[in-house]
Amino acid sequence: MANDEVQKPVNTGRRRFLTASTVVVGAVGAGFAAVPFIKSWNPSARARLAGAPVTADISALQEGQRLILEWRGQPIWIVKRSKAVLEALPTLDGRLRDPESKNADQQPAYVLKANPELRSLKPEISVLVGLCTHLGCSPEMVAEIRPEPFDPEWKGGYFCPCHKSRFDMAGRVFQGVPAPTNLVVPPHHYADDNTIVVGVDPQGA
Ligand code: FES
């Protein structure tokens, strides 16, 4: 199981995620380290209420780590995926409900155009709304490739403890679980190589 701080919900409501004023980084395995790199993420209270874009510096994000922002009252996950995880994604297609992300409501078109199977603008960086598409719990990140009690052929992904929905590391939903659709990819773009802006499409998109 991932050593993932976000799996300690502070309340039991629909939004089961940590909404502290600072950002939480979850990491996998023994390599956990706090990452003091959130200088640029500091939206004012007024901006957050208005659903203004949020910006994050991802320069210090390590493989297997997850940065969590809040945008429009939702947790936004920014995850750096390893090469092994990226290589495993295509092998899962036959077990997924919508492997090609044909449901256009679940991600912007420019994300699919960039990397269809990875559902991301940059191959290694995944940006997702961290709410289960069943009833809105926040799934756990279980990023390591290893057999899990809920899936002996687990290739890393997200497991929702509420009703056992599973998603891969691109947020694609497995067959045979309650969640009907893939996790949502929010609108976002890169202001520069290491700066993600969540809430605004790329120019010209
Ligand atoms: S809310 Fe995630 S499986 Fe039901």
Image (cartoon, rainbow, N blue to C red):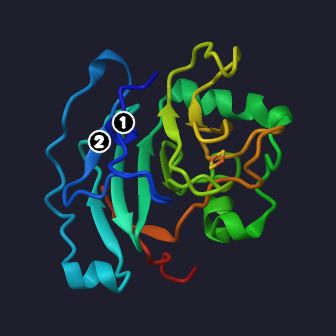
The answer as to whether callout 1 falls within 8 Å of ligand 1 is: no
Residue 26 image offset from top left, x and y in percent: 33, 37
Residue at image location 49% in from the left, 55% down from the top: 127
Q: Nearer the viewer, residue 78 or 147?
A: 147
Viewport quadrant of the C terminus: bottom right
Task: Determine whether 118 is above or below 50 in the image.
Answer: above
Residue 80 image offset from top left, x and y in percent: 42, 40
Residue type pointed to by label 1 = Gln
Element class at badge 1: loop
Q: Which mark is residue 86?
A: none
Task: Determine whether 56 is above or below 109 in the image.
Answer: above
Question: Are the residues at dot 1 and dot 2 in contact (C-beta closer than 8 Å)?
Answer: yes
Q: Which mark is residue 25?
A: 2
Q: Nearer the viewer, residue 193 or 201?
A: 201
Residues packed near mark 2 inside 10 Å, few (<14), some (14 to 19) or many (20 plus): many
Count of marks, rendered view: 2
Relative to 14, 65 lies left or right: left
Relative to 59, 13 lies left or right: right
Residue at image location 19% in from the left, 40% down from the top: 35
- What distance separates the C-alpha of mark 1 from that of mark 2? 6 Å
Q: Which mark is residue 65?
A: 1
Residue 94 image offset from top left, x and y in percent: 86, 33
Q: Earlier in the sequence, mark 1 or mark 2?
A: 2
Task: Determine whether 41 is above or below 33 in the image.
Answer: below
Residue type pointed to by label 2 = Val
